[in-house]
Image: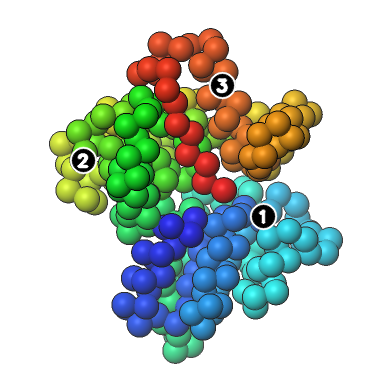
Amino acid sequence: QVRKLEFLMADAIKKKCDTVITCGGIQSNHCRATAVAARELNMDCYLLLRHKDKDPPAGYHGNLLLNRLVGSHLMLVPYEGYESGLKMRMENLAEKLRQQGKSPYVIPLGGSNEIGLFGYITAFHELTKQNVLDEFDDMVMCVGSSGTAAGIAIGNYLTGNKLSDEGVGKSWDLTQHNRLVLQRQNCLVSVGLTDVHAEDILDIIEGYKGKGYAVSTTEELEDIVRISSTTGIMLDPVYTIKSVRGMLAEMKNNPSRFKGKRVLYIHTG
C-alpha cells in the first residue's frame, strides 16, 4: 500500500489537492496507510469502509482505531451494493467537498490504478538492481485489487519475461473476479501496452479465499503460528496466509503450473 501511495500522494500534491478520499474493508490496511500519509501531508482524509452489519462496530480497534487517531472521517458502507456503487459514492462525496471549497483527490480501492501500479514497477526494478531475480524462476504474490500483481507483471514483461508471474487471487464472486480482470487489463493499456493481454503475463490462481475476506479458518490461524514460530516471518490472516497456503497447495498438487522449482514469494506486509 505504501509503495502505491508514494506515487498517488505525489500526484495529489502536484494537483494541489487538500483532501483524499479512498475506500476498503473496515480493517483495510490500504485505508490506514492512506489516513496516516494524509495526516503527515496535512491533508484531510475521508474513508468509505465496507461494513457487514447494520449498526456501527462496538468500539474501535486495529486499523479502525488508528484511522480515528489520525483524524480521518469514517463513513460506513453496507456490503450490499458496495462494489457496484463505490465509484459513484466517492465521486458524489468529492463533488460535495468541492462545493465546500475543498480540493479532493480520489484514490481507488487498494490504490490500484495507472498511477499506483508504478509503486510495484519500481519494486521490480529494485529487485533487478539487487540481482535477486537471477536466483528464481517464478514470482508469487497475493492478488487483491490487482495493483501489486499488475505492477510486478509489467516490470517483468518490460525486462524480457525472465520469470513466470503467479498471483493467488481471492475474488469473492464472479462479479468481482470479472471486475479485477478488467482492471488488470486497464492497467496494461494505461502504460501503453495495448497489444498485451493480462492473462499472458500474469497467471491468477483462484480457489484459496477460504471462508472469505478477513474470515479465518482454524487451519489458517494454526499455519500463521507455525510459520512465524519456525521462520520468524509474520503472515496476516486477511491476505498473505491465504496466498501462501494457495502457493504451497499448487506446488504440491499442480507443480507444472510453475516455470521451475525456485519460487520467490513477494510478501507485501
**Distance between the alpha carbons at the discs numbered 1 and 2:** 35 Å
Q: Do the numbered discs 1 and 2 sit on residues whose CB atoms are within 8 Å?
A: no
Residue 160: x and y, percent?
Answer: 20, 33
Q: Mark 1 points at which residue?
A: 27
Q: Residue 158 carries which label?
A: 2
Res. 64 in view: yes
Q: Which of marks 3 and 1 is in front?
A: 3
Which of the two labelled residues, at mark 2 and mark 3, occupies the earlier sequence position? 2
Q: Out of 250 and 106, give the one closest to the viewer.
A: 250
Instruction: Report helix, strand or loop for mark 1.
Output: loop
10 Å crowding of disc 1: few (<14), some (14-19), many (20+)? many
Q: Out of 97 and 59, give the one closest to the viewer.
A: 59
Residue that appears at 43% across and 77% down: 104
Residue 107: x and y, percent?
Answer: 44, 63
Q: Is residue 155 above or below residue 174?
A: below
Amino acid type of the residue tagged 1 in the rendering = Gln
Amino acid type of the residue tagged 3 in the rendering = Leu
Instruction: Report helix, strand or loop for mark 3.
Output: helix
Q: Name the residue under label 3.
A: 248
Amino acid type of the residue tagged 2 in the rendering = Leu
Which of the two labelled residues, at mark 3 and mark 1, occupies the earlier sequence position? 1
Residue that appears at 66% across and 68% down: 67
Instruction: Report helix, strand or loop for mark 2.
Output: helix
**Distance between the alpha carbons at the discs numbered 3 and 1:** 26 Å
